[in-house]
Amino acid sequence: MSRISHSIEQRDRSATTWQDTDSEPGAAERIVEPSLTREQIRSTMTRRLTQEEQLLLILWYAERMEPEEIAEVLGSTAARIRIIHDHAIAQLREPAAA
C-alpha cells in the first residue's frame, strides 16, 4: 500500500475513495449499468471483485490514473492492467452481479 500512497502523493492529489467520487455525476453508473444505483455498484464491487480489481478501478476512475501509471503502482504492465480492467467491468455487468 505504501507504493500506492506514494504514487498518489506524487500526483499531488488528495486521496479519494470510490464513494466520494462525484467529479462527474453518474459516471460510474454509465460505465457499469445505467439502471444500477451507486450503492448497488459498490455492493457488487465488494462481493464480486478481487481486491486487486477493486483497487484498479478506484485508481482508474476515482484517481483518474492512466493504465501506465496504475501499472507502475501495481508492478505490472499497462497491457495487463487493461485486461484486468476489462475483466472487472465484465464482472460488474453480469446480470447475476446485480
Image: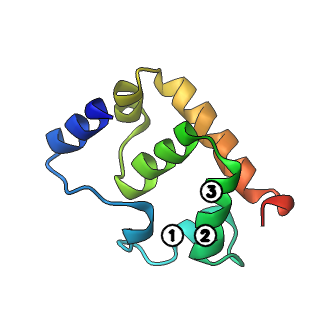
> Depth-wise, is mark 3 or mark 1 nearer the camera?
3
Q: How crowded is mark 2: few (under 14 residues within 10 Å), some or many (20 or more)?
A: few
**Location of the C terminus (image quadrant):** bottom right
Give the structural element (helix, strand or loop) at label 3: helix
Q: Mark 1: few, some, or many residues within 10 Å (few <14, many ≥20)?
A: some
Q: How far apart are marks 1 and 2 (CA)?
A: 5 Å
Q: Residue at 54% of width from left, 66% of height from top?
A: 28
Q: Where is residue 26 in the image (x, y as percent from the top left)?
A: 52, 76
Q: Which residue is under mark 3?
A: 45
Question: Which one is nearer the viewer's eye here, 23 or 7?
Answer: 7
Identify which residue is drawn at 47% across, 21% down: 77
Question: Which of the numbered marks, if any, corresponds to residue 30?
Answer: 2
Whole-percent x, y for residue 92 in the image: 70, 56
Q: Does 15 appear above or below 11?
A: below
Q: Quadrant of residue 38?
A: bottom right
Q: What residue type is labelled 2?
A: Arg
Assign the N terminus to one quadrant of the image: top left
Residue with the mark numbered 1 = 27
The colour scheme is: rainbow
Instruction: Tell me the SS state at disc 2.
Output: helix
Q: Find out whether the residues at labels 1 and 2 contact each other: C-beta distance under 8 Å.
A: yes
Q: Residue at horizontal 68%, vertical 61%?
A: 44
Residue 58's mark? Answer: none
Q: Residues within 10 Å of mark 3 (few under 14, many from 20)?
A: many
Question: What is the residue that sits farthest to the right in this orientation?
Answer: 96
Amino acid type of disc 1?
Answer: Ala
Tell me which numbered mark, 3 or 1, is placed earlier along the sequence: 1
